[in-house]
Amino acid sequence: MKLAIAQFNCVLGDLAGNAAKILRHAEQSRKLGAQLLLAPELCLCGYPPEDLLLRDGFRQACEHELLDLAASISGISVVVGHPHEHGGRLYNAASLLRDGAIAATYLKQELPNYSVFDEERYFDHGTEPVLFEIDGIRFALNICADIWKPEPARLARQAGAQVLLVLNASPYAVYKQESRYQVIRERIAETGMAMVYANMVGGQDELIFDGGSFAMDNHGDLTAQGKYFEEDLLMLEFRDQLRPVGNLEADLSLEASVYRALCLGVRDYIVKNRFPGILLGLSGGIDSALTLSIAADALGKDKVRALMMPSPYTAQISLDDSREMVKILGVQYDEIPIEPMFQSYLTALEPAFSGSAVDTTEENLQARIRGNLLMALSNKFGSLVLTTGNKSEMTVGYATLYGDMAGGFAVLKDVSKTLVYRLANYRNTLGQVIPERIITRPPSAELRADQTDQDSLPSYDVLDAIMACYVEQNLAIPEIIAQGYPEADVRRVVQLIRISEYKRRQSAVGIRITERSYGKDWRYPITVRYQDIF
């Protein structure tokens, strides 16, 4: 018996387009000899549909599209994920489409309501297993979070299932695939069933779905592995002892995985939202250089425009390195010096600033002039501005509102500064595009003479470690200090995190690559008197 996994890129709300993709995969799978096609969670409408599910028209449109899809399928059975309304309740469901009709519908039992998930807001819980038979093999269904708890798989086994099929819209985060393997092996050890894991691929706002669909036999051995970060039709054949065997794709390094996730996130955000291209401010620094390389790799050079806006504090090597990089990549490049505008601002403000010392105000003015220029080009030509700030900077508020934070999509929003360097070095192993001097010179905002980031911040290796402990692992201040980090640095970073929430709340949506990003994962109040003591 042959089974296919349709690992495809949904467009949220494009019901007809998603159904057409399912139909094409069904026809291709049938021609390759498959008797069953497994598609991802909620793939008919896209994931996560969020408050669209509260609209009657959307739910009705999903139902009509499912019926039309079922009527169009012949010669193969298809399991498809979709919203399902029944008895005045709404469910996250998966239906078996067979012989032109809906043969069975499974209702998701475990509804995640943590991290980026809000399924309790929309769906009710299912309670029963659903079994069906093809070529003498008894299959059961689970949907994503079901598999992370023992009960749904146990109920399926008790009902007589031999193979468990799991539909997923599981968002990417670093090391997430290892967690998936682990939990599937736990369910296999408990039930003795072989399992097939179908995952979505593509970008949806801040979320990335990395694909990587796979199968394991009833011993927990990996027997098939799909591609990462791209569409795939993974063919499986059940052999002796119901062992699902198929192609085995190689795993990716951390750097390769994150880089491909960022490229996919940029490409899908721009393409799915129909922007003609992107533009960004190039500074000669590591963050804008990495963002530029990701944009060019994701979209192609013809859809990328870089703008260099030198000030009196911009080093010549920053100009030289920026010019070299855009020449290598072949993207459109402009230079607009900001010194005349900066002096105009200072002249206009001189009466109001009389008697005040020069401080960060003058630095922020330069950043805001640059933000205005970028947004002017965006308005004129329709391209979306990519911001270039990283997670370390957003953590401690080392960014200027309406300046370098101006833009519509934050590529590095969840990427620490230390990881930025690793990704830049990784990209250069694929072909040198980032000048080496950009990677090796001390980072600087170049908003005043002889400035470096470490004038204002702890070293990035210390800052990033404290950030990971406090933000991503939720450790308390004494626990972080106990790991050997200087108490003064720990308390300083935590204080900066606390007072910078108002900035983060106004930042552009950005790609999530960790289990705790500054998006749906992070819901801290802006106005609050509590301070971490313990």
Image: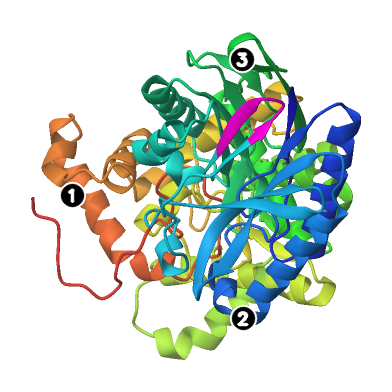
Residue that protrudes farthest toward the top in the picture: 240
Instruction: Tell me what residue is drawn at x 55 percent, y 65 percent.
Output: 508
Q: Residue 149's image quarter?
A: top left
Mark 1 or mark 2: whose residue is earlier in sequence: 2
Q: List the residue tagged with mark 2.
A: 56
Instruction: Tell me what residue is drawn at x 69 percent, y 67 percent.
Output: 62
Q: Examine the rendered structure and indicate whether residue 239 appears above or below residue 56.
A: above
Report if residue 244 lies within the magenta region. Answer: no
Residue 356, image x, y percentages: 34, 79
Which numbered disc covers residue 243?
3
Q: Nearer the viewer, mark 1 or mark 3?
A: 3
Where disc 3 sits, the SS reads strand
Tag 1–tag 3 contact (CB < 8 Å): no
Q: List the residue tagged with mark 1.
A: 491
Quarter of the picture holding the N terminus: top right
Q: Is residue 476 left or right of residue 103?
A: left
**What separation in Å lies between label 1 and label 2 (alpha carbons)?**
50 Å
Q: Is residue 330 left or right of residue 463?
A: right
Magenta region: 133-140
Q: Is residue 514 left or right of residue 295?
A: left
Mark 1 or mark 3: whose residue is earlier in sequence: 3
Q: Nearer the viewer, mark 3 or mark 2?
A: 3
Residue 22, image x, y percentages: 79, 48
Residue 60, image x, y percentages: 68, 75
Q: Main secondary structure of the magenta part?
A: strand
- Mark 3 Cα shell of 10 Å, populated few (<14), some (14-19), many (≥20): many
Kind of residue sitting beneath label 3: Arg
